[in-house]
Amino acid sequence: MSVNARYEYKFESRDKVENFHGMQVLYIYWPHHLMFCSPFAVMVSPDMTFGDFLEQILKPAVASHPDSAEADFENAEWKLNDGPFTPDMSATMMGSGIDHKSMLTVTTPGLDGISGSGS
Amino acid sequence: MATKNKKLNLKDRYQYLTRDMAWEPTYQDKKDIFPDEDFEGIKITDWSQWEDPFRLTMDAYWKYQAEKEKKLYAIFDAFAQNNGHQNISDARYVNALKLFLSGVSPLEHAAFQGYAKVGRQFSGAGARVACQMQAIDELRHSQTQQHAMSHYNKHFNGLHDAPYMHDRVWFLSVPKSFFDDARSAGPFEFLTAISFSFEYVLTNLLFVPFMSGAAYNGDMATVTFGFSAQSDEARHMTLGLEVIKFILEQHEDNVPIVQRWIDKWFWRGFRLLSLVGMMMDYMLPKKVMSWSEAWEMYYEQNGGALFKDLERYGIRPPKYQDVANDAKNHVSHQAWSTFYQYSQATNFHTWMPEKEEMDWLSQKYPDTFDKYYRQRFEHWDKEHAEGRRFYNNTLPQLCQVCQIPTIFTEKDDPTMLSHRQLVHEGERFHFCSDGCCDIFKHEPEKYVQAWLPVHQIYQGNCEGEDVETVVSKYYHINIGEDNFEYIGSPDHKRWLAIKGESTGKKADSTDQNAA
C-alpha cells in the first residue's frame, strides 16, 4: 500500500547503507538469553572477517552472561535472516552474504540462560 | 419583552457562540477552505448531525478553568512551602515523575498542537469548537504538569531538561514518534488515534495509575493536578466516543477505514503503555495495583463492553487484541529489564525490586514472574552485591514502527522474541511484532523515515560516537547524577539524609562506574 496523502508521498529511507559512512548495521540475536533484552545492534565493516566479528564484537557483547564462557559460537547453529547459515571464519561480511541490517541468530544448544529460564 | 431577559439560556448561548459563528462561504469554494477534509476517504454527509458532548461555550470554559487553576496553584504553593517532597513514600517514586515529565508532559503539548491543527481542518463548526477547547486543555495540562513537578526539580536529579530530552533521548522517541505519527496523519485519523483510541479506550490506563500512584505515594502536587485535569479528561473521553460514532453513522464506506485506524492505534497505544506498566509494577514504592489487573479492568472489561457497543456499526475489537491481552503478564517485566540494563542512558534511576516486592510480583503474576523473570532479577541482584552492577554495553535493535527495542516475546513461547522482518525496496526492516509489521506494510513510506535513535548514533548525528558523549552532550543527562543505579545515587543519598538515616550497606557496595 502507499500513503494516502494530498501530494506525491515519497521519501528516502533514513537508514540506507550510504548514511553509515562505509559501515553497515548488523543485528545479533542469541535465543534463550533474554538477560540481553533484545538483539544487539552493532556496526561492522563489510570487509570484516567473520572470525574477527566473533572475537571483537560478539564475545565482548555477551561476556557478562554466565553462559558466555561455555558458549561455542564457532560450532553453534546459525541463521542469517530467515535462512540457514554456515559461518566461514575467514570470509568477510560481504563475502558471507551478510548485508546491511541483516540479522544473525545464533543458537547454542544446551545453554538455556540463567538457571535454564531463558534469560 | 425579550430584551428584559439579558441572560441567554444555555441552549441559545451555545447556538450563538458556536454554530452561529460559522458561515457558508460565497466567494470561495468550501473545498479550498478545508482542503484536508476529504483525502482520507472519510465521507461526511451532514455536519449538523455532530452532537457536542458538553455544550460548553468559550466564556463558560474560561470561567471553569480559571476557578480550577486558582485552587490548583494554591495547593502547589502550599506543597512547596511545606517541603511536600519530604512526605513521599520513598525517593524511588520521583523516578516515575521523571519518566512522566519527559515522556508524557511533552505529549500533552503535542496534543495541543494536534487539536489546534485539526480544529482548523473540519468544515463542521461543532467539531472545530470541540477541538479548539481540547487544544487549550492540552496546553493547560502540559503547563500544570510542569508546574506540579517543578518543586521536585529543586531537590532531585533528572528533571532539569524534559522537553529537550523528549526530542533526543533514545526511549523518548517512543512517545514522541507515537504523536508525530498521529499529527502527520489526516484530521480524521488524528481524532481516531488520539480522541478515540488513546483518550477513550486507553487513557484510564495512563491516568489512573499515575494519579493513584501519586496519591498512594504521598505526592500531593501531582494528585492535585490529576483532580484538576479529571473533568477535562472526562470531556475528552466523551468527545472520543462522539467522534467515532459520528464518523461511523455518516457513511458505511467509513467503516473499513475506521476499523484499520482502530487496529493501528490500539496497537500503537498498547505498545506505548508498556512504559506505564513498568512504572506501576516497579517504580511505585507503594503499589496501587498490578499492570495485569489494570489491563483486565480498564481494557478487557471496559474495552470489551465498548467494542460490544460498536458492533452495531460493523466494528470489531482491534486486531491482535489477543496478543495484547496475553502480554499483560509480561510487558512490565520486559520493559523494566530493558531500562535496568540501559540505565547508563536514562534520565532516571533503576533498581532491582526488594525481596517483598519480588514476592508481590510472584503473587500478582503467578504464571510468569517466577518462571521467566525472577532468576534474571536475582542474578542481577547478586551481581550488583558483588560489585558488578549489570549494564548492557551494546546498543539494542529497535522496532521500525514503535521504536521500542525488540524486547517482546511470542504469545505462545515467552522464551523467544517476537521479532519480524521484511524487505522493502531492497532494504531490510525489523519489527517487534506482527502488529507493528502490519502498520509498516500499510504505509511503508511513512516509517522508512523513522528517526531511530540507535541508527542515528551510528550515523554520527548525535554529537559523539560513544555512549558517554551522546548521553552527556546530546541528551543533556548529567552522568553520575541523573543516570545509573538508584542505590548509592545522589538522589538516594539525599533521601537518606532527609530521613536522617545513614547510607546502608547495600549502597556502599555500589560501583557507579560499572558501566
Image: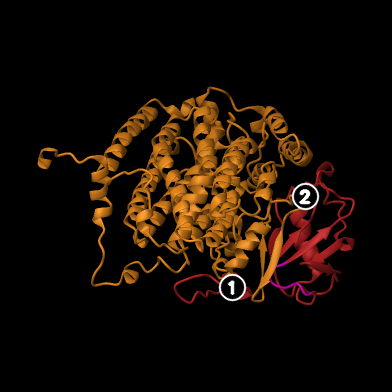
Check the image and name the residue furthest to the top.
B500
Secondary structure beneath dot 2 equals: loop
Q: Quadrant of residue B77?
A: top left
The chain drawn in red is: A
Dot 1, crowdedness within 10 Å: few (<14), some or many (≥20)? Answer: some
Q: CA distance from mark 1 to mark 2?
A: 38 Å
In the rendered image, residue B409 lying in the magenta stretch gets the answer no
Residue at which label 1 appears: A19
Quadrant position of residue B502:
top right
In the rendered image, residue B161, in percent from the top left (x then y), is placed at 45, 48
Q: Colour of chain B?
A: orange
Chain letter of the residue carrying label 1: A
Mark 2, residue position: B412
Is residue B349 in view? no
Q: Which residues are magenta?
A: A97-102
Residue B191 percent across, percent down from the top left: 45, 55
Is B114 positioned to the left or the right of B458 in the image?
Answer: left
Residue B453: horizontal and vertical position, in percent? 57, 60
Residue toward you, A2 or B179: A2
